[in-house]
Image (spheres, helix red, strand yellow):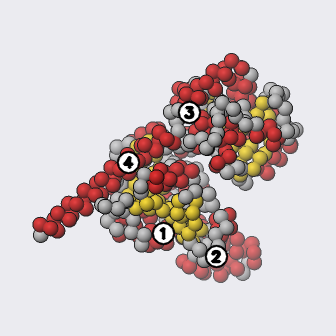
Amino acid sequence: MSRPPFVYMITQDIPVIDRRIILQAQSLQQAGYKVRILTQASFEATQAINLPAGDDSHEVEGIAVEYLATRGHDPRYGWLYRLGSLGGARGRHQANRAVTVLGVLHGYNTFRRLAPYWAARAKADIYTAHDLDNLQVAMLAARANSAPVVYDAHELYPEISYPLVKLRKNYWTKVEARLLPKVAAASTVNEFIADEMAKRYHVPPPAVIYNATNPPPGFDLANPPNLLREKLGLAADQRIALFQGQLAPGRGLDKLVLAASHLAPNIHLAFMGYGNLRPVLAKLAEAQGTSGRVHFLDAVPQSELIAHCASADAGLIPYQPVDLNNYYCSPNKLFDFIVAGLPIVANDLPFLHKMVVGNGLGEVATMDSPQQIAEAINKLLGNESRLRQTRSNLLKAAQVYNWTNESKKLLAIYQQVAERLRNNQLDFADRQHSE
């Protein structure tokens, strides 16, 4: 292959494409690959990125992104929309929800129904499926172009307790069992999920690429900013324990709010992120009389996230083992905290235990109750000598767990796939010549 390979990545992230995908795309592009991402364009997504009507492309952090329109009515269920319209606005809303469920039950939402054709016409050299719900799309598009597929499993997908996934758990398990042995290469986010996939599907463990990141340009870990105290108007002697990211169920956030009443008087909780739980959590804090010590901040751009993390005193990961996927979780925020030099308080789950305890990065504890969460936060933030040692350990860990190192694993995978692709093309050319 004389030209650089063309990698076509498929995801359903909206409106913000996952950092892991963007970092992978940027690393491949910097290594000479041509990279494009396909995702869906719901009405909400196009509004969020200000995509003009009629446009189907956009650039995200230097990466070309194609948006496949999924807004509007699914033509398969016209009868249901017509029935719903008889009930006014409420009826139309219920019809839309019913269409979503039917799409799940049938195994194809609008994106998965349309995307194989869109992706196939790109005529890519390598197709990448980001997560299991995109693997069928990638395989169909790749088959049309005799191209290999790389599968990056961000989750132990069949085990997610989200209702629309849980509803089809057996279906997704069968899809992964059937297609995983057929991909050219597979990767996932940690060794626990890799080993689980190998055990249940009788395949070699996928390569492990951590959800690591790099500090933004100009970030100085030795002189962290004071952004959170400035935003919250807190004095220097007040401690800040930070949860950042999506405010979603299964993350122990209600217990975290309730833990505020058990914290040392100088410790504040800060929630920085987005999600439907924010007003619920705010009301919970108000009801227990801790709204003055439980603060809510809007999400910040990725370029500003590390600096905000660095200005806290502890980073919180109270994820609950509500399903096997959560039990084995390795969230982005873990690596954000490492790069930011922020001591960590986490639930005692397998990968979190390995990283936090194994590298001396903070405190892990069973977090079944608000009291247990508060005790772990108080224990870490109440010990100055331990905090100093933890920050020293974090400096060392940041030299190991970063995207500069993880990207080498990624490039090795694609180099092997591209080499096999090139050799297959040479073999084909040789056979044609001999004939």
Q: Which of marks 3 and 1 is nearer the N terminus?
A: 1
Q: Where is residue 146 in the image (x, y as percent from the top left)?
A: 32, 65
* SS state under label 3: helix
* Three-letter amino acid code at the position of disc 1: Ala
Which residue is disc 2 drawn over?
53
Mark 3 or mark 1, whichever is nearer to me: 3
**Where is residue 83, by image quadrant?**
bottom right
Q: Residue at x 72, y 81 (%)?
A: 86
Disc 4 versus disc 3: distance between alpha carbons?
Answer: 23 Å
Q: Nearer the viewer, mark 1 or mark 4?
A: 4
Chain-order first, disc 1 or disc 2: 2
Distance from the alpha carbon under mark 3 to that under mark 1: 38 Å
Name the element at disc 4: helix
- Report the residue marked by disc 1: 115
Mark nearer the viewer, 1 or 2: 2
The residue that label 3 is drawn on is 398
Tell me which numbered mark, 1 or 4, is placed earlier along the sequence. 1
Label at residue 413: 4
Viewport quadrant of the C terminus: bottom left
Badges 3 and 1: C-beta atoms under 8 Å apart?
Answer: no
Residue at 37% of width from left, 46% of height from top? 412
Q: How crowded is mark 3: few (under 14 residues within 10 Å), some or many (20 or more)?
A: many
- Labels 4, 3: front one: 3
Give the image location of residue 197, x and y in percent: 42, 45
